Amino acid sequence: MNENKIIITLAVTGSIGDKSKHPGLPVTPKEIAESALDACSAGASVVHIHVRDPETTEPSMSFELYEEAVRRIRKTSNMLINLTTGAGARIVPDNAE
């Protein structure tokens, strides 16, 4: 028996790409959360999330989109959530966030 434990991390959307590159790409917070929860059921412990603009499918840094994705995941799972804005620090949250 192998005593080594592993942690599986799912990068739900990847950092670059849109529906034109992969039609199955989850875009809305609901789709992102569903993909994360499916992966959790399959054994993933961590989800790495880049949110997308639901209208353009391009990467977004919208606080509200991140908030909705996290809220949907937290309704049913305590998996670790790694939120990221992609390549580079381009956002400075205000004190309310």
Image: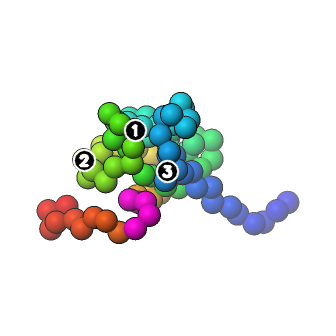
Label 2 crowding class (10 Å Cα cut-off): few <14, some 14-19, many 20+?
few
Amino acid type, residue under disc 3 in the picture: Ile
Q: Nearer the viewer, residue 56 or 31?
A: 56
- 48 in magenta: no
Q: Is residue 86 magenta?
A: yes
The residue pinned by badge 3 equals 16
Closer to us: 29 or 14: 14
Closer to the observer: label 3 or label 2? 3
Residue 8 at x, y percent in the picture: 62, 55
- Left or right placement of residue 12 versus residue 8 in this view: left
- For badge 1, the amino acid type reads Thr
Q: Which residues are magenta?
A: 84-88
Q: Label 1: which residue?
A: 57
User: Quick one: label 3 or label 1, which is nearer the N terminus?
Assistant: 3
Between the residue at mark 3 and the residue at mark 1, the CA separation in whole angstroms equals 10 Å
Front-lying residue, 84 or 57: 57
CB under 8 Å between callouts 3 and 2? no
Q: Quadrant of the N terminus?
A: bottom right
The residue identified by callout 2 is 64
| N-terminal label among 2 and 1 | 1
